[in-house]
Every structure is written in structure tokens, then in C-alpha cells.
Image (cartoon, rainbow, N blue to C red):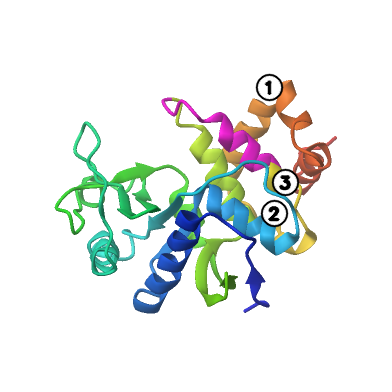
Amino acid sequence: MSAVVVLPAMSRGQRDGWCALLDLHDVMSTGWTLVGGQMVHLWCAERGVAPARPTDDLDAVLDVRANPAALMEFTTALTGMGFAPDGETWNGHQHRWVRDEAQIDVLIPRWLGARAANGKGAGGRTTLETPGAQQALDRTEEIAVDVGGRLGIVRRPSLLGALVAKDAAHTVVLDKARRRHLTDFLVLTTMIEPQDRLEDASARDRTYLESMLGALVRDGRAVASVEGAATGVSTLRLALGLED
């Protein structure tokens, strides 16, 4: 495991959410990974890059393919820590769990079939599916972190897994705030280093990555909005063998 990553000062709700994830690792050390904006913030802290956008909530995706009971186990642990579902979506999903100002969204991979999709958590309801999550889970690494003096372990995808997760999230066209995934993706490209081995991307990974690169071509302003992104995108294209 690498050296301890010291996370920057954060809001009370964000800190409480992070500490909850560290507590969760103590009771459920496998079967989940951090995704979303806080995943990007963690990578920024690891590589010394400033995040491009604020975000307080945390997102965790569960490996229900390997453990069909993961949703029940994870949300039962949350319940034991004082979290409760923050209502339901219009179609009955309970994905958001809150405790005071802390907020954790609990997700599962998409395309795993009806049994996985219909699994219920401690609140008696299903949760949301998200694309690209299995790739993130399959590339999960454990990182030691310091959150305001609280030391612990968090699980997050490799940089390749993080890039694919953001690409996949951007494909959800009903997400009214999907542009944030472009920004997050661009920030991640600025951190690419040789040891990240992006050349190991699978055919499915490449489908997502090339789709996002195409979206960036169509949105000429996005790359210019993130410092270093032009170089980062070029590095990614080289790693994937897409440069002439």
C-alpha cells in the first residue's frame, strides 16, 4: 500500500461522510469502491492536482456480482452507524443515505440482470444501477488516507478504472448535470502517468473512452476549461494508440 494520502480541509458533511466510509471499511473491507466526485478529489489529493469543482456527497458502488448480499450488508452497516434512507425515487429506489450533513449514495453496476437489480437493502428497497461500475470495481485499490486526523483505508478504482467510470456516467443522457462528468474526466487526464498502464484498457473500456473523446471533440470549450487538459487528452490518445 502507498503512503498515507492527506485529504485537504473539507466541509463538515463531507468530512463526516469520509469518516463513515473509513468506519465501513473496518466492518466491510471488500465488495465496494468509491466513485463519483469524491473519487476524483481523492485522486487529486494523491497526485497534487487541484479539483475543478466542489462536491460534498460520496458515492459508493457495490460488487453485487461477486456478493449478491452486498447491498443488504453495506446498508445494514450504514444503518448501524446512524444513517437512514433519504426518501425514495419515483420508481422506488433508495440510493441516498444520510446522517445529519453526511450523505452517501449507494449504487450497483448496470447490466447484471434482474436478480442483481431487484436486490434490496436494509430499508427494504432496491437501489440505482450505474454503467461502468463493474470496471471500477474490478480495478479497485486500497488507499490509506488521513481525513482531518482520522486515519483509515478507502477503496477506489485505479486511474484507468476512474476514467472509465466517468466516461460511462456521461452516457446517462437523462442526467441533467452530466457535463460535470466531462470536467471530472478532463481533470483525471491531467494526472496520467506511465505506471497507470492505460494501454491495458479492454475493448469495453476503449468503447467508453473513445465515446468520451468524441464528446470532447464536439464540445470544444470543455478542454479549454481545465488547466492541462489538452496535454492530458493527448497523452490518453497516445496511450490508446489513437494518435497518428
The reply to whether residue 34 is in sight is: yes
Give, as a three-letter code, the residue at label 1: Asp
Estimate the x, y position of residue 66 in percent, counting from the top left.
33, 65
- Of pointers 2 and 1, the one earlier in the residue sequence: 2
- Of pointers 3 and 1, the one earlier in the residue sequence: 3
The dot on residue 101 is none
In this rendering, the answer to whether 49 lies above or below 222 is below
The reply to whether residue 204 is in sight is: no
* 184 in magenta: yes
Q: Mark 1 sits on what residue?
A: 219
Helix, strand or loop for disc 2: helix
Q: What is the C-alpha distance between the residues marked 3 and 1?
A: 16 Å
Tell me the mark number nearer the camera, choosing from 2 and 3: 3
Q: Residue at x 41, y 25 (%)?
A: 174
The region drawn magenta spans 174-186
Q: Main SS type for the magenta part?
A: helix
- The reply to whether discs 2 and 3 touch (Cβ–Cβ < 8 Å) is no
Q: 60 or 51, which lies in front?
A: 51
Helix, strand or loop for disc 1: loop
The dot on residue 198 is 2
The dot on residue 189 is 3
